[in-house]
Image (cartoon, grey):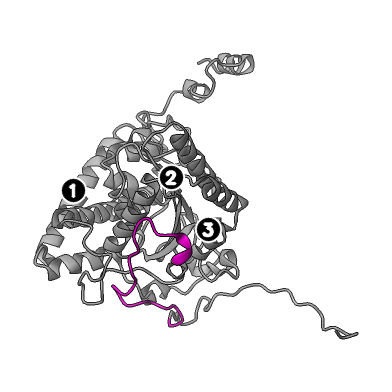
Amino acid sequence: MTDNPAPLKFHVPEPEVRPGGTPDFSNVPIPKAGSVDRPPVDVDPRTIRDLAYSIIRVLNREGDAVGPWAGTLTDEEQLEGLRHMMTLRTFDARMQMAQRQGKTSFYMQHMGEEAVSCAFRKALIQGDMNFPTYRQAGLLIAGGYPMVDMMNQIYSNEMDPLKGRQLPIMYSAKDHGFFSISGNLTTQYIQAVGWAMASAIKGDTKIAVGWVGDGATAESDFHAALVFASTYKAPVVLNIVNNQWAISTFQGIARGGSGTFAARGLGFGIAALRVDGNDYLAVHAVAKWAAERARNNLGPTLVEYVTYRVGAHSTSDDPSAYRPKTESDAWPLGDPVIRLKNHLIRRGLWSDERHKQTEAEILEAVIAAQKEAESHGTLHAGGKPSTRDMFEGVYAEMPPHLRRQRQKAGV
């Protein structure tokens, strides 16, 4: 021990590269597709700690599905999955354009992350409940929720199922297993764990799924949820979508010294895995494995999806201020739509011509849905929800002060 210690230094994690620099992901270890073992569903979490540091992959560079995690989807289901991702991407493009045209106040795209929510949805059954963030609209697309209803909510028009009471893209669809989106990050985790515990207490068969991004793991609710999930073996799957960037800070700010986000589950005795989030087949396989654990009273699973947010955080964000414009091109795990497309072409189930035709068909369907939604109003034109609606749906019996306010409003 020295009498003259050196001054303390405050450490702030820095991204590998700043705007204007050359993107470099050479330090990101990418295991060979098919190289990660698939443990039995009833495995003791303590014996699979290595899965919190590796990445489960099924599709290799050539487009083949290889390894022990392959084979969870039929040919028809894979074709359907490609269409779901293509639909979500087209939906995003049209709604982004609508926002720029002033038809809605706000929008958030899923570019590069389509496989995560679209594939996960197909591992669930009717009655399971997702507690999503604002970038899991693929759960609705893949679950058959009408695009017109989604657009009505975005436009807050007279047919908005939420009556204009939610920010655009903060959907709610209980019948489709989609809990109301909360803008307060990480509330999804404690809500999902609580819902799952209630399902178990009732002796039901339904499981819950919580969703957060990498940045939200720094919130206290994240850790509180893991305590309850591990203690009570809640039938829940807890998903972390690591798209490398929070609103404007890189993942290292929230990750701290844990090495990976999945590794945070290890200290709670929770089964933890990392998966290639741009591999539709791998996402589905891991989702099915984790859902089966929950459904068989084997406890919670924490899953980190390694992906990349290609676009801006939202229509209010300019990513060129904090990352190189070409960074997405250097991302080593590729594009989820292109990867599944190439796999299906390699197997003779798809073709470039059929892909182009399907793109045109999807665009036509999305435009038709958009025209129908816009006929009921947009942000600055057409029908709006009734002012009366803002007073309804909160209290079983409206308190006196709200009745007075409603009377003053003349509704």
The residue under label 3 is which amino acid type?
Answer: Gly
**Residue topped by disc 3:** 269
Whether residues under marks 3 and 1 lie with C-beta atoms below 8 angstroms apart, the answer is: no
**Residue topped by disc 1:** 364
**Which mark lies nearer to you, 3 or 1?**
3
Magenta stretch prevailing secondary structure = loop
Q: Earlier in the sequence, mark 3 or mark 2?
A: 2
Query: Is residue 206 shown above or below 10?
Result: above
Write the start and end of the magenta stretch as one range: 26-47
Task: Inspect this view and state whether residue 130 appears.
Answer: yes
- The residue at the point 32 percent across, 71 percent down is 334
Number of residues whose C-alpha sits closer than 10 Å to that of mark 1, classed few (under 14), some (14–19) or many (20 or more) = few
Number of residues whose C-alpha sits closer than 10 Å to that of mark 2, classed few (under 14), some (14–19) or many (20 or more) = many
- The residue at the point 47 percent across, 74 percent down is 324
Q: How far is mark 3 from mark 1, CA to CA?
A: 49 Å
Task: Inspect this view and state whether residue 95 appears.
Answer: no
Which quarter of the figure is the N terminus placed in?
A: bottom right
**Residue topped by disc 2:** 235
- The residue at the point 45 percent across, 79 percent down is 23
Q: Using the image as rendered, state which of residue 174 and residue 297 is in the foreground.
A: 297
Which residue of the protein is positioned furthest toward the right in this rendering? 3
Indicate the quadrant where residue 282 lies: bottom left
In terms of secondary structure, where does tag 1 sit?
Answer: helix
Q: Position of residue 128 (x, y in %)?
A: 36, 40
Q: Using the image as rendered, state which of residue 197 and residue 109 is in the foreground.
A: 197
Whether residues under marks 3 and 2 lie with C-beta atoms below 8 angstroms apart, the answer is: no
Q: How far is mark 2 from mark 1, CA to CA?
A: 40 Å
In terms of secondary structure, where does tag 2 sit?
Answer: loop
The residue under label 2 is which amino acid type?
Answer: Pro
